[in-house]
Amino acid sequence: MRTKHTIFSNRRRGFTMIELIVGSAVMLVAIVGALAIYARSNKVSVEQQMVTEVQNDTRAAMFFISRDLRMAGAGLPEEFAGWFLEGWDNEDPGGGAEVMPDRIRLMGNIEDPLNLPIRNYQGSSVVLDIEDYSFEQYPYPDDFYRNKFVIIFPNPDSGCRAAEIRVITQVTHSTGGNNERFNFSPGLAPGIDPPGGLSGTCASPNDYDGGQISFADVKEYWLDVTGNAAGLTAGVNGYIGGGVGGILYMTHNGVHFPLARNIENFQIEYDGDMDNDLLLDGWAPWQPTWTVAETARISQVRVWILGRTPRAFTSVSGRVPGGIHVYRRPAISNSPAAAADDRHRRHLLESMANVRNMSLNLYNLGQR
């Protein structure tokens, strides 16, 4: 018997092997293409996130250092202007590092205002008397002063140019506002070194009569290139260490605060009327031969902070684009450029700060 072919029998035939292979190949190509597009998009997204992180790090660091540079010397006697800041040019971090960053140390009555005249102080003693009703000029309660760092300046007319940094244990005073005094821990504050070697004690106790006591903010900005800074211990006083480099620190009164990571270079230049001819001399790196008088004439500081992504870009193929400042470390100030591209993206910030208008009375005390 011959079987008649009907529409129902044709439907039961299904796909041939060739049709399945072709269909699977087409589907596989589509899936691989979609995965490739996703992988590249994800790679670009991750790399752009790294760039954004580097930009945020450099901007945050620049904000703090610019603010503090403007406040260098704020509230301190003008006669000590030569000790308000100190720089180091191209420090060698050791360990075969290619980049040698700059460092700057500055001092000022930056965070909390305090400017009180000294009535009697014997030098390195544990008690300092101030003028009656001095504490009443500020709204601080007695507990606020405890464990604060202060800097004690001698009378500028005495000729002594040494200042003491002490730690307050307590303040005492009578209810009526007289017999007001500071009490200190014995000895100078450990680990706190003002710029320019100002720390010391005057030979005569009379040098301090008519001097000034202020809260001390000694700040130092420096870049840890290797993560193994000499003289520091990982995990002590805020220092990260342990080989984690590329971190810009602010050391405030002996405590290390990591401001930003992914920082490759940190350079500083200075401008002022060093030769006292009423004309600015032009930008220059820190010169160790500058005298105290020349340092006192610095009026502007220029800062560069160079950020670099922690990993090289893999989404860049072929030749690196012509903007080598993006994929190669650029020359900054007297710090040389890299010899070759490394495919790390970079973000360079530059800022200038005018330093300390010493004729400005920040605290409205009727002085200067």
Image (cartoon, helix red, strand yellow):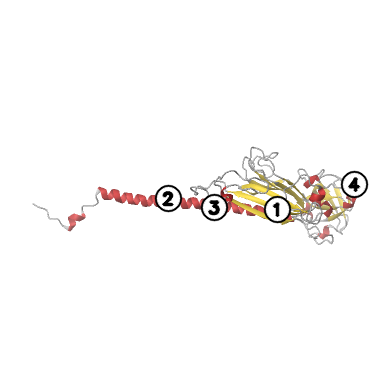
Graded by Cα atoms within 10 Å as few (under 14), some (14 to 19) or many (20 or more), the crowding at tag 1 reads many
The one of 181 and 116 positioned closer to us in this rendering:
116
Graded by Cα atoms within 10 Å as few (under 14), some (14 to 19) or many (20 or more), the crowding at tag 2 reads few
Q: Are marks 1 and 4 in contact (CB under 8 Å)?
A: no
How far apart marks 4 and 3 lie (CA) works out to 59 Å
Q: Nearer the viewer, mark 1 or mark 2?
A: 1
- Give the residue type at disc 4: Pro
Instruction: Give coordinates of residue 155: x percent, y percent.
Output: 88, 52
Q: Secondary structure at mark 4?
A: helix
Q: Are marks 1 and 2 in contact (CB under 8 Å)?
A: no
Q: Secondary structure at mark 3?
A: helix
* Residue labelled with disc 3: 49
Q: Are marks 4 and 3 in contact (CB under 8 Å)?
A: no
How far apart marks 1 and 2 lie (CA) works out to 46 Å
* Residue labelled with disc 1: 302
Q: Secondary structure at mark 1?
A: strand
The one of 79 and 6 positioned closer to us in this rendering:
79
- Quarter of the picture containing the C terminus is bottom right
Graded by Cα atoms within 10 Å as few (under 14), some (14 to 19) or many (20 or more), the crowding at tag 3 reads few
* Residue labelled with disc 2: 36
Query: Who comes first in sequence, dot 1 or dot 2?
Result: 2
